[in-house]
Image: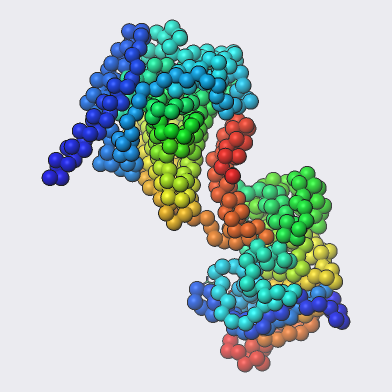
Amino acid sequence: MIQENSEVILTVRDLTANVDGTQILKGLNLEIKAGEIHAIMGPNGSGKSTFSKVLAGHPDYEVTGGEVIFQGQNLLELEPEERSRSGVFLAFQYPLEIPGVSNLDFLRVAFNAKRKAQGLEELDAFDFDEMVREKLDVVKMDDRFLSRSVNEGFSGGEKKRNEILQMAILEPTLAILDETDSGLDIDALKIVAGGVNQLASPQNATLLITHYQRLLNYIVPDFVHVMAAGRILRTGDKELAHELEAKGYDWVLEEAGVGV
Amino acid sequence: MTQVTSLARSSDRATALSQLLELRPALQASNWWQELREQAAARVQEMAIPSSRDEDWRFTDLSPLLQVEFQATSARTEAIEPSSIPEAAQSCLVFVNGTFAPQLSSVEMPEGVSIASLSQSNSEHLQPYLGRQQGADEVFTSLNTASFTDAAVVQIARNAIVETPIHLVFISHTSSQAIVQPRALVVAEANSSVAIVEEYLGFGEDVYFTNAVTEIWLEANARIDHTRIQRENSAAFHIGKTAVSQDRDSHYACRAVNLGAKLSRHNLEVYQTGSQTETVMDGLTIARDNQLSDTHSILALTQPYGTSSQIHKCIVDDRAHAVFNGKVFVPKAAQKTNANQVNRNLLLSPKARVDTKPQLEIVADDVRCTHGATVGQLEADEVFYLQSRGIDAATARRLLTTAFAYEIIDRISIPSVRETLGGLISP
Ligand SMILES: Nc1ncnc2c1ncn2[C@@H]1O[C@H](COP(=O)(O)OP(=O)(O)OP(=O)(O)O)[C@@H](O)[C@H]1O
Ligand SMILES: [Mg+2]
């Protein structure tokens, strides 16, 4: 929801970034305020995941210019774990499997790392267990997923739900969901969207990366951005998503004078 | 010139070996045992400490062993707390410096199990088993056979299904550069079943040399679940042999965990004497600082319808060095054999090193054998995934390293052993 005078959570100015020496982000600008839901859409390979991983601090991506201010601090100089603890969360397009690390242990270590950074007392295994069980409800996940290794052997949809479970536990200020809707059946999509809506509040913000207008029926964005060739070329409201669905991206690129 | 030096070196190595042999205590033993000792001693007289020109010792340089002037071991009696396994509280045999320590042992064995220390038992019936495994004429095995004065003997009676694990503890507790030569013999008679935990522990900080031999016999349809844990002190040398014979339809599983010693070598050898056996050989080596930890396994699937699976993992940090060599023989007669071998190595530091050599020799044509080895570092993407959830890089690496080890530890059947090892590997 767009609110008057609400705090700016994220400011991205002229961001450029390389991977393996190839420039992928080519001057990206974006501002997100508390309470807002933003959606980024754009053709395959346009740099959406790259942008999300740059925000999360993935070591393979080299920022070559521009700045990212998250709640008043320079996000780019923080380690990935510091970014997470200060409230940035990325639900990955392709969540990794981590054999041998139990989901429950993983969630507890992550949760307590944040608590510790906030100067709060860590939760013991018992209290944490109780808290996790409540959060499972947000994504309607069965508790047998807790004793399994992180994402190992999970179906595509189960992995995505597990990402949202992590988000529910870490309660981020800025949640970036990279194609969390891809590969979900309609019931799972409703569950995931319901979870995201439940976690959204006037104090936090959500950035959705998606290819499908369908998701935006369930999580209604305040802004829709079109990303292509490493930049945001156009910004509109939720109607823009319908227009893109109907007409594709070419017209946006043409109007922006970007070669197809 | 070169030849002179190498001759000199090999004679040094022969001298060093005969000096070790001279340290063996005198023994009043029954005739057959005495004869076994002398035959082994005669073999040792003809041999030398192997050098890296021996194919079997290519990656493990024993020169540091030559630099220590070893002494004969003496029995120690002061109280030691051996690690205890609650599940085996009543079935624990402890040997200190190669000698049975009744005060540390509890020997109310479950039904169907007879145990003894060889020095105390009427031993005629053991003659067909002791020192009779293939590979018994290998140099360190021979040295042990020529030298040991006591042995842990475990016999499982025909048809006995033993629920309580048997814990064999071999402690080296010495302050005088001693050579300690523990020996164990396990005989599982037909249709019996038992779990054995064999553990090597070192106390103190002084250098010593444990040269251990364990022989295991599985008769038809017997089942042994064997856990071998090597936790010598960080100055020690450890050379250990596990020789196993499997008669038809038997099942043998070994989980070998190598944590201790400055220089260690585990020789695990499994020989089939009947068809349709099942063999599992899992291993975990963790080497830090400047440890060298070597595992050589031999699996001789010489009969039809055998199956085997082996997964050996090494975690190598600092300047440590791990070696794995896994031989699998499948001769012509061994049709319908199914053998899998995997060796995975995790290098945690740029100076860490691993030498791995899976070696399959397959002559039979109707078999299914797979093997593979990987050497890698922690996956950067996995570390990042954990970091992106607020877990610092060091903790992330520790979690992932522990997870790598747990694949083996989780296969150990005794809960308290899993727990103890879990505590040891995740500081
Ligand atoms: N390691 C790499 N080396 C070279 N190029 C890379 C690397 N990683 C990503 N790229 C390239 O960067 C571009 C942007 O990729 P990115 O994953 O950000 O796209 P995306 O917009 O998320 O696409 P999609 O909609 O398919 O998820 C692509 O052309 C991709 O091939
Ligand atoms: Mg993407």
The percent position of residue A162, horizontal first and vertical second, equals 71, 57
Where on the picture, by quarter, is residue A164?
bottom right
The percent position of residue B418, horizontal first and vertical second, equals 60, 35
Image check: B373 left or right of B402? Answer: left
Classify B396 as above or below A207: above
Residue in the foreground of this view, choosing between A56 and A252:
A56
Image check: B219 left or right of A255? Answer: left
Residue, x 32% and y 12% (percent of image)?
B34
Instruction: Name the quarter where the C terminus of chain B is drawn.
Output: top right
Residue, x 46% and y 51% (percent of image)?
B318
Q: Is residue B148 visible?
A: yes
Where on the picture, by quarter, is residue B176?
top left
User: In the displayed image of the protein, which residue is found farthest to the right?
Assistant: A4
The percent position of residue B112, horizontal first and vertical second, equals 56, 13
User: In the displayed image of the protein, which residue is found farthest to the left?
Assistant: B1
The percent position of residue A111, horizontal first and vertical second, equals 73, 55
Residue, x 30% and y 28% (percent of image)?
B139
Image check: B220 left or right of A128? Answer: left
Residue in the foreground of this view, choosing between B44 and A235:
B44
Image check: B42 left or right of B172? Answer: left
Q: Is residue B141 visible?
A: no
Classify A88 as above or below B347: below
Classify A159 as above or below B164: below
Instruction: Name the quarter where the N terminus of chain B is drawn.
Output: top left
Residue, x 58% and y 87% (percent of image)?
A260
